[in-house]
Amino acid sequence: MIEKVLRIIDSKRDEVVEFTQSLVRTRSENPPGNESAIAALIVKKLKEYGIDQIEIREKVRDRPNVIALVKGQKERPILLYNGHMDTKPPGDLASWRFDPFSGDIRKGAICGLGAADMKGGLAAMVMSAAAMMEANIRLKGSVLLTFVADEENGSINGSRWLVDREYIKADAGLVAEPSGIDESFEYLNIASMGILAFDIIAHGTQMHSGVSNRGRCVNACLKLSELLVTMSREFRLDQTHQLYPKGPIMNLGALMNGGVQYGVVPGTCTAGNDIRLVVGMTSKETEQAVRAFIKRLKERDPDLAVEIQVKAAYEPVETSPEESVVRSTVKAAQRVLNFTPKLAGMTATDDASFFIRGAGIPTIPAFGPGLASCAHKPNETVKIKDVVDAAKIYSLLALDYLGAARLPADH
């Protein structure tokens, strides 16, 4: 059974490539956010492979979520595979060596925006299910495929909403995010960082710059810049975790906006910031620490007038390495890759946070094709071999976890 599934996926290599290319060529940047075209493409491909138990759940127009079921002999257990259909915008087009929507193939890799994050993962999910259907395998449980909207901008219209509405029910899950940094599949991420995203808004004295040397004048942009520099030097969060030995990550001044025009002293300036939280931290405690630090700065500088607005908060999550889904994934990876990926913590956050905390589903936050290090930047690619290997891993994981065929440990 195992060899049959692997042979089928190898025979579909060209189909995997063509489907991944078509996903890359189908635009789904967020913002602005519209996954309708790519959702239609995925639904069409699923139906071609005989997967017709499909639901479309949509919170708002043009933000569809595709939920497909490969039904087994029993209703439970259910193994969830998740991937997001949206991408970040391409950014500076002059920095791209190729058209970000070309889907061109170069040196064995598919090129384009979202190739790694995570249209290669979407293709692998579909091809895994297609292979099991063609092999006529009757799984003891079911596989639930979720292709979701809006992950790149908070999942308000995607997994968060689906979990809140209880549209997703499963016993274990895996998010097909790219999990390599330097090498393909080098990490099996069983944890993900949380995030506290917040604005610091500084207030100053808007006035004509020609009279700024007469009387009291507070430049909001300068005040905020001084605060950020001081914060980068003095503010510390000492929490660590075995999967995150370097602790949390602070990214100050990710966004900056202030001023009116030349000739005007800026009266307001805003900096968008984020702190990546490790397991053991909470967004609330981190927010309190930030507020306490800035309060001390205000006590030192009577001209410093700032406020804080929290924009997003997600908690870090962790799945035990002893969970069956982790053990089955390790065995599947060993069989396909001939090495054992290192258990690690994802250096970002994704929809696993909602599945674990909101639905109680033990979930692997990231194990998929491509390098996370090439995501959200120009010249994104995913190796064809990675997509094919991911499809094989997802198939063998389903066979082992759902009891259709047991894989030997330490292959």
Image (cartoon, helix red, strand yellow):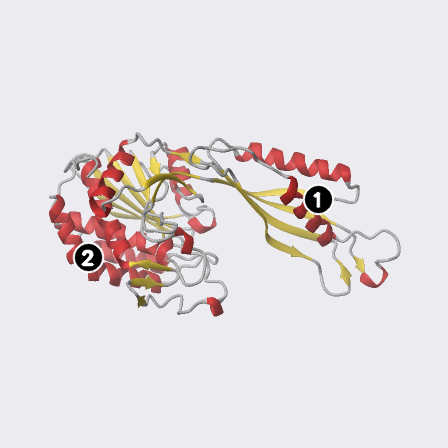
Q: Nearer the viewer, residue 351 or 226?
A: 226
**Residue type at tag 1:** Val
Residue 250 drawn at (x, y percent): 56, 44
Q: Nearer the viewer, residue 7 or 79?
A: 7
Q: Residues within 10 Å of mark 1 (few under 14, many from 20)?
A: many
Quarter holding residue 112: bottom left
Q: Nearer the viewer, residue 224 or 135?
A: 224
Residue 6 drawn at (x, y percent): 16, 50
Q: Nearer the viewer, mark 2 or mark 1?
A: 1
Quarter holding residue 356: top left
Label 1 sits on a secondary structure element that is: strand
Question: Which residue occupies 34% across, 62% down?
Answer: 24
Q: Residues within 10 Å of mark 2 (few under 14, many from 20)?
A: few
Q: Quadrant of the C terminus?
A: top left
Left-right relation of 265 to 38: right
**Residue type at tag 2:** Glu
Residue 390 vertical position relative to residue 212 in the rendered view, above or below: above
Left-right relation of 73 to 353: left
Q: Quadrant of the N terminus?
A: top left
User: Can residue 170 be spotted in the picture?
Assistant: no
Residue receiving disc 1: 306
* Mark count: 2
Residue 83 drawn at (x, y percent): 34, 48
The reply to whether the C-beta atoms of the residues labelled 2 and 1 are less than 8 Å apart is no
Residue receiving disc 2: 48
Label 2 sits on a secondary structure element that is: helix
The answer to which of marks 2 and 1 sits earlier in the sequence is 2
